[in-house]
Image (cartoon, grey):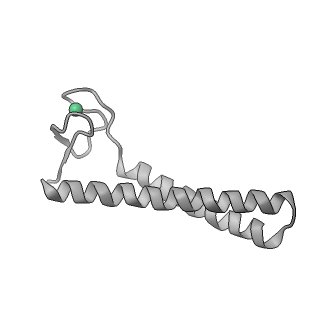
Amino acid sequence: MSRVHCVDCREPVPGDARVCPHCGAVQPSPLVDAGIVVAGVFAFVFGAILALMTVGTTRLAGFLLLVVGFGLAVGGYTRHVDRQAARRAR
Ligand SMILES: [Zn+2]
């Protein structure tokens, strides 16, 4: 059984716990990370389509969406990798 540590007080908490039994801090769930990455990839693809297929303001919005989507996808993935590394270190 995999043990995770509280993001706040670093006490071990059950892997499926949503809230820390020690300090009550809400634990980030892997599902949230996956959701962020999926949303980021969708925004990235949609932004790329807008940027390539349209002109003017819509194109600008597409570029913006592309950048935001890329940031979300990379950020979500980095968070996930960081936590994996932190878990392995203990
Ligand atoms: Zn805690």
The answer to whether residue 70 is left or right of residue 48 is left
Query: Tag count in the figure?
Result: 0
Which sits in the foreground, 82 or 29?
82
Which sits in the foreground, 4 or 73?
73
Direction bottom: furthest residue: 52
Give the x, y percent position of residue 25.
Answer: 30, 30
Give the x, y percent position of residue 86.
Answer: 22, 54
The answer to whether residue 41 is left or right of residue 21 is right
Residue 36 vertical placement versus 46 (above, below): above
Quadrant in which residue 47 is drawn: bottom right
Residue drawn at (19%, 42%) of the image: 14
Quadrant in which residue 40 is drawn: bottom right
Residue drawn at (26%, 44%) of the image: 16
Residue drawn at (48%, 53%) of the image: 35
Give the x, y percent position of residue 28.
Answer: 35, 43
Give the x, y percent position of residue 83.
Answer: 28, 54
Ligand 1 is found in the corner quadrant, namely top left
The answer to whether residue 34 is left or right of residue 63 is left
The answer to whether residue 66 is left or right of residue 11 is right
Residue 45 vertical placement versus 39 (above, below): below
Direction top: furthest residue: 23
